[in-house]
Amino acid sequence: MKLILFKQVDYRDNDLIVNGINENNQRISFLIKGAKKPNSKSAAYCILGNEYNYICDQEDIIKMHKFKGGELLKSHHHILDSLLKIACFNCLLELTDKLCKEDEIITDGLYKNLAKALDLLEKDAHELLVLALFMAYACEQLGIKPAVDKCVECDSDKIVALSVEKGGFICQNHHESNDQLYKNIELLKQFRYINKASFDNYEQLCYLDVSLLVINCFNNFLNIHGAINLNSYEFLTTIVKSAIN
């Protein structure tokens, strides 16, 4: 079974339960015994973000399997070379965890998009663009995709701000004091482009210097409209702000 690991949980003294997403966009769990023991051979098959081919029985019947061996298909160890990459990596994995539930497929293309995001994060230097595209994908899958063509209140194309509460772009007549990206044309364009794009358009968007303010808007959409609170997001904001300063 091919899968990408996105979460691990301590189990008993020396064991781990790892969670992965398979090619059918299903959440699959494995119990890996002895993974926390010193010099454990199975520890090499528990690294988050890596893609493995696990050996298991009855994969069509149950969702919890006992680990019986495997093969490493792809490693993303270069993500650990940068604190910003690590911060974005943590957000990607936590968001994946929130998107897929036991015995329920609520997302289309989760495996493919996570794999693409990790590959780009591994080799490239546009970390916030990668995270933004994955967040935009998550919003679309959750049915909370922001409206970025016209004012959500009156269909005017004279946009001045983004209202997360109202679900999209707002004109001057409907602007309120708590609206975001107010009169920041460049950031409003960034937010629109990313919402219109996918990872297929990544190369065309690499010129964008994605702002943390744009990432904040996606995070707020996920929180307010998708009831998703990313615990790892605070670390990302700390890293980005420290880099700016």
Image (tube, rainbow, N blue to C red):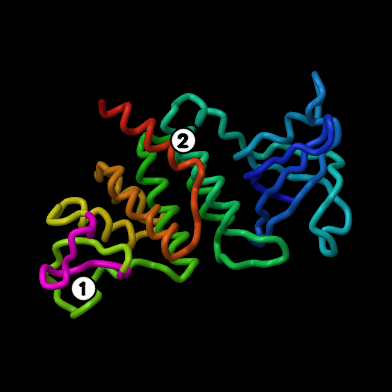
Which range of residues does the magenta coloring cover?
Answer: 166-180
**Which residue is label 1 attached to?**
150
Q: Quadrant of residue 50?
A: top right
Report the residue at 49% width, 48% height from top. Answer: 230
**Which residue is label 2 attached to?**
87
Q: Quadrant of residue 28?
A: bottom right
Does residue 174 belong to the magenta stretch?
yes
- Picture coordinates of residue 212, whole percent (x, y): 30, 43
Q: Quadrant of residue 111?
A: bottom right
Secondary element under disc 2, as helix, strand or loop, is helix
240 is higher (above) or lower (below) than 226: above
Image-based side of 210 in relation to 96, left or right: left
In this rendered view, identify the residue nearer to me: 167 or 115: 167
Does residue 15 belong to the magenta stretch?
no
Report the residue at 67% width, 67% height from top. Answer: 104
- Picture coordinates of residue 38, whole percent (x, y): 80, 19
Image-based side of 134 in relation to 44, left or right: left
- Picture coordinates of residue 214, whole percent (x, y): 29, 50
| Circle 1: residue type | Lys
242 is higher (above) or lower (below) than 49: above
In this rendered view, identify the residue nearer to me: 41 or 156: 156
Sequence-wise, which precedes: disc 1 or disc 2? 2
Secondary element under disc 1, as helix, strand or loop, is loop
Image quadrant where one finds the C terminus: top left
| Circle 2: residue type | Ala
Report the residue at 40% width, 52% height from top. Answer: 219
Report the residue at 41% width, 32% height from top. Answer: 84
235 is higher (above) or lower (below) than 190: above
